[in-house]
Amino acid sequence: MSHIALYQRLALVALIALPLTACNKSEPAPAPGSGGSTPTPAATNKPVKVIAFDENDVTLQGIKDGSVVGTIVQNPYMYGYKSIEVLNELHKGNKDVIPADKFINIPARVVLKDASRGEFAGAKVEDVDTFWADLKKKVSGKSDDAAAAPAPSGGDKPSYAFVTNGVANFWTIGKAGVDKAGADLNVNVTTIMPSGITDQTRRVEDLLTRGIDGLSISAINPENQGEVLSKAAEKTNLISVDSDAPNSSRLVYIGMDNYQAGMICGKLTRDALPDGGKIMIFIGRLDQDNAQRRRQGCIDGILGREPDPSRRDDPGAVLTSDDGKFIILGTMTDNFDRAKAKANAEDALTRNPDIAAMVGLFEYNPPLIMEALDRAGRLGK
């Protein structure tokens, strides 16, 4: 082969190789976990933080085990007890039980594995063992009869009804408080746990027809239940509990500041993610006043915003903190459907393998989140 032919062949080989080299330089391999590549196994297997609301036994065990950061607890037992106590005083004509602002505040608390912090975001911190032991003691005296037994009428004793916004362990604790107050005050009490807004409205109408001396209700959708609430206020002493009906003629609201409690939950979430991350919020429904306020407080706490209880972010909006560290992917609702609640958690995990935390704002949400995470091998310890 001549020198000229050899040079031509070498030049042709170099020309063919050149585009491949240039292509490799202009399109470097995507970094692991970036948008241009499939997340690495390490990224998809990273434990997800669980931040909870309320005192479900599974949630409390999760705190003990370390798979749940902590929970913001109300006091459903006292909601039930105080409701009957206030209704009884009103029945006796004692209006002094109603504060000037018509709000009987039963503050939220924070339950952690260790209570050495003493206080978090202005709320009392309790260790899970002490809190759980006290809860079991309170609930152990609950009756085994049906939660929706007919309200008694007539006789010498006044009769009061405690109407919840759904069926949940949270309300079983509330019923224990109702029953204890009934025994302590020697009055007739009944607890009704409706399946939904239609059932709740029907049950209230039935109570009013048969006669009731006082009614405490956690209205599912107070704006759409204005007529039945007005009728109740005309016929008996009406108070709201847990979720307020601020535009109704209720005499007083017994509960907590749900916006402030949500803020505490949001700050606990933020505290659990020092490096930030993606977060999904789960809740039963957003028709209720307490749900709207709790969710918004949680969002504002996570994003580090200035408090504004009147703010309402769209449930489907992706929200990012000013520093870009915290991203709220949205809010998923389930309408008290447990299967849907678990499916929501599974869907959020599948669609967002790099998710850092899941926040359950209704009592049953955290245990179902834990189930979904455990199945995916993402439940932390």
Image (cartoon, grey):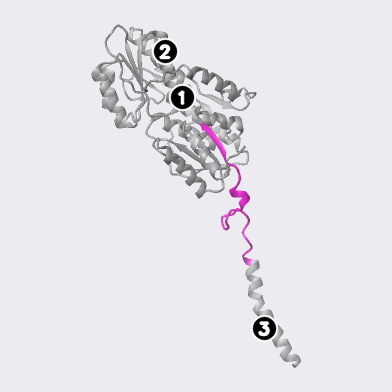
Q: CA distance from mark 1 to mark 2?
A: 24 Å
Mark 2 or 3: in front is: 2
SS at badge 3 = helix
Q: CA distance from mark 1 to mark 3?
A: 78 Å
**Residue placed at 54% from the left, 36% from the top?**
302
Front position in the image: 349 or 16:
349
The three-letter amino acid code for the residue at tag 2 is Ala
Q: Is residue 104 above or below residue 93?
A: below
SS at badge 2 = helix
Q: Is residue 297 above or below residue 40?
A: above
Q: Residue 289 location, x and y as percent? A: 39, 29
Q: Could one spot residue 304 in this view of the protein?
A: no
The residue identified by callout 1 is: 257
Q: CA distance from mark 2 to mark 3?
A: 95 Å
The three-letter amino acid code for the residue at tag 3 is Leu
Q: Earlier in the sequence, mark 1 or mark 2?
A: 2
Magenta span of residues? 26-52
The residue identified by callout 3 is: 12
Residue farthest to the front, as pictured: 144
Q: Earlier in the sequence, mark 1 or mark 3?
A: 3
